[in-house]
Image (cartoon, rainbow, N blue to C red):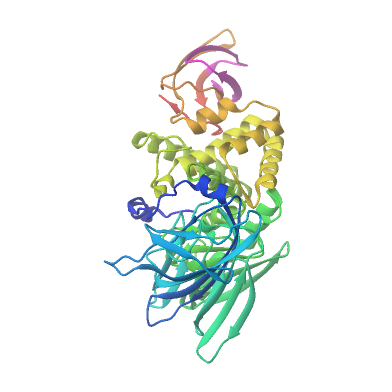
């Protein structure tokens, strides 16, 4: 996910409607396998009529279990009202209060799959955004991140809950509908109504389960590695949109080459009404309406969202504090795309700008990347999760070397694809592949706040540079520091010293008289130099 700068204030003010509670306890009780969502929309009202068939298994005998679904608000009239719930063909008792559906199951035996049919209706309070687009046309777009899916369908609204999903969408026949997975059926029900049936084959977290219903111009770009790539834009921006998203195949090819097999059955890039700059919904990415300009202005945004298909959608963070495993990865893999297609200078400039962003963020907010205290999840979309997460991966790459780093990244992805991982899971994979103890590295860069703040002095004497390095911040960091020794004749040489103390003295051999020392010339470290 990525946000344009002019959306930042809005996003930080947005409050999530529900804080995930005791999700581990819920997952120890039930395992949702599949959602089957029938959804009817119309132009006369914003109310939806829906039926959710939820297939699940009990892990133990339960007298009751909970799902998330927003209640109808008596003041605004928005929210969902449940008509009935059936377990297989037997009606069951339930209560719907405080955005929770508490269901009393009939004879729940562990290990047996049960299907609960929930019939409900209402005006979505959020999550399914019903509005008019830039051109006054009515649109319906899912926009679930972080935990807003429960505004329009009953679920366990947490990234650790993964399930397959299929949609039966009934809409006026002048609309087109796109959703996760592949198109099973498109049928005219009568002269006014159309049915779309989309279905996934792999499990997804609720944050990236969406539908998009609008008037679209659609271009099939073609296939790459047997993956169909398409563009869905408003008809009024057809030529511009087809041009802007034409780079998707090249980006997809690049990521398949460096990461591995694409995890989904299609890649569709969709102009939409998402509140984010881009939202990485699985297999069909939604981009903000104004992203279509015809000038290829948002290639990096497209690269970022496509990278999420592997990291965030397939290999997902186990809980919100580990969101850097999604956003930091997508940010760094965008950097790698820039390095490949725009050159080393552009890559280094990007790293330098990201470092400055992190340093400026720390002046305002001193939190670690793995932030377990922030419960307003929108606020986790910050420089720690994005830019610092990316820089941590870059430093890890330099720590391990390219060969080991890439072996570790691919091993991590293969182990956790279509599943969930914590930061420790990632650390353990990288440690095993490299044969190194990475506890200090992960602790100082991810579990603690801050970064090295260095003060230095040096002299040149008898073909050596004698340099003093002081760490002025409270927390001690251990890291390699690259130095560029600039000679009086303008030539230079690169040396690396290891910093592991608050104050340290180093003698560095030089091949000629030194007039200047440049710290970290190739942007390999997150630090400040006073």
Depth check, front residue: 283 or 356: 283
Residue 146 percent coordinates (x, y)? 46, 54
Depth check, front residue: 183 or 259: 183
Residue 226 lies in quadrant: bottom right
Image height of 511 relative to 422, above or below: above
Depth check, front residue: 160 or 285: 160
Query: Which residue corresponds to the image point at 35% horizontal and 54% vertical from the top-left?
Result: 14
Question: Quadrant location of the C terminus?
Answer: top left
Query: Please, what is the dominant secondary structure of the magenta stretch?
Result: strand
Query: Which residue corresponds to the image point at 58% horizontal and 7% vertical from the top-left?
Result: 462
Report the label total: 0
Q: Which residues are magenta?
A: 485-514
State the residue lying farthest toward the front. Answer: 107
Residue 154 percent coordinates (x, y)? 48, 63
- Residue 160 seen in the figure: no
Residue 83 lies in quadrant: bottom left
State the residue lying farthest toward the bottom. Answer: 191
Query: Which residue corresponds to the image point at 44% horizontal and 49% vertical from the top-left?
Result: 20
Image height of 169 relative to 274, above or below: below
3 to the left or right of 258: left
31 to the left or right of 64: right
Residue 89 percent coordinates (x, y)? 58, 72
State the residue lying farthest toward the top. Answer: 462
Depth check, front residue: 57 or 445: 57
Residue 496 percent coordinates (x, y)? 60, 22
In reply to whether residue 289 is colored magenta, the answer given is no
């Amino acid at each position: 996910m990525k946000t344009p700068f002019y959306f930042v204030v809005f996003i930080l003010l947005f409050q999530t409607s529900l804080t995930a509670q005791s999700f581990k306890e819920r997952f120890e009780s039930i395992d949702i396998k599949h959602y089957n969502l029938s959804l009817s929309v119309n132009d006369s009202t914003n109310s939806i009529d829906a039926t959710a068939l939820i297939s699940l298994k009990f892990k133990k005998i339960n007298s009751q279990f909970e799902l998330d679904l927003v209640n109808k608000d008596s003041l605004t009239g928005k929210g969902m009202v449940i008509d009935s719930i059936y377990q297989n063909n037997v009606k069951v008792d339930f209560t719907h209060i405080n955005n929770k559906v508490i269901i009393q199951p009939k004879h729940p035996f562990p290990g047996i799959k049960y299907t609960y049919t929930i019939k409900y209706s209402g005006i979505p309070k959020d999550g399914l955004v019903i509005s008019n687009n830039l051109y006054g046309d009515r649109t319906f777009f899912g926009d679930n991140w972080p935990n807003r899916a429960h505004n329009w369908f009953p679920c366990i609204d947490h990234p650790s809950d993964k399930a397959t999903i299929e949609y039966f969408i009934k809409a006026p026949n002048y609309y087109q509908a796109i959703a996760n997975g592949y198109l099973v059926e498109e049928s005219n029900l009568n002269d006014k109504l159309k049915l779309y049936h989309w279905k996934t084959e792999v499990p997804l977290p609720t944050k990236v389960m969406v539908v998009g219903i609008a008037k679209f111009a659609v271009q099939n770009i073609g296939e790459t590695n047997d993956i169909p790539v398409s563009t869905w834009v408003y008809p009024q921006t057809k030529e511009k949109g087809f041009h802007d998203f034409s780079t998707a195949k090249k980006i997809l090819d690049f990521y398949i080459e460096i990461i591995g097999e694409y995890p989904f059955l299609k890649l569709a890039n969709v102009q939409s009404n998402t509140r984010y700059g881009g939202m990485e919904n699985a297999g069909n990415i939604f981009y903000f309406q104004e992203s279509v300009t015809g000038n290829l202005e948002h290639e990096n945004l497209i690269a970022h969202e496509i990278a999420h298909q592997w990291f965030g959608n397939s290999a997902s963070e186990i809980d919100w504090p580990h969101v850097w495993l999604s956003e930091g990865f997508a940010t760094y893999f965008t950097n790698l795309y820039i390095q490949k297609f725009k050159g080393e200078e552009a890559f280094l400039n990007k790293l330098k700008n990201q470092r400055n962003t992190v340093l400026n963020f720390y002046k305002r907010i001193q939190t670690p990347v793995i932030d377990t205290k922030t419960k307003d999840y929108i606020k986790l979309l910050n420089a720690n999760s994005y830019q610092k997460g990316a820089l941590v991966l870059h430093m890890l790459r330099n720590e391990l070397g390219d060969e080991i780093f890439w072996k570790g990244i691919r091993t991590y992805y293969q182990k956790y694809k279509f599943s969930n991982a914590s930061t420790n899971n990632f650390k353990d994979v990288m440690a095993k592949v490299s044969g190194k103890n990475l506890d200090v590295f992960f602790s100082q860069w991810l579990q603690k706040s801050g970064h090295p703040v260095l003060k230095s002095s040096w002299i040149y004497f008898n073909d050596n540079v004698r340099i003093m390095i002081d760490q002025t911040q409270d927390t001690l960091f251990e890291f390699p520091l690259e130095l560029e020794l600039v000679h009086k004749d303008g030539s230079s040489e690169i040396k690396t010293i290891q910093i592991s103390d608050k104050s340290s003295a180093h003698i560095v051999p030089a091949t000629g008289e030194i007039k200047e020392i440049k710290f970290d010339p190739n942007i390999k470290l997150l630090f400040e130099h006073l």
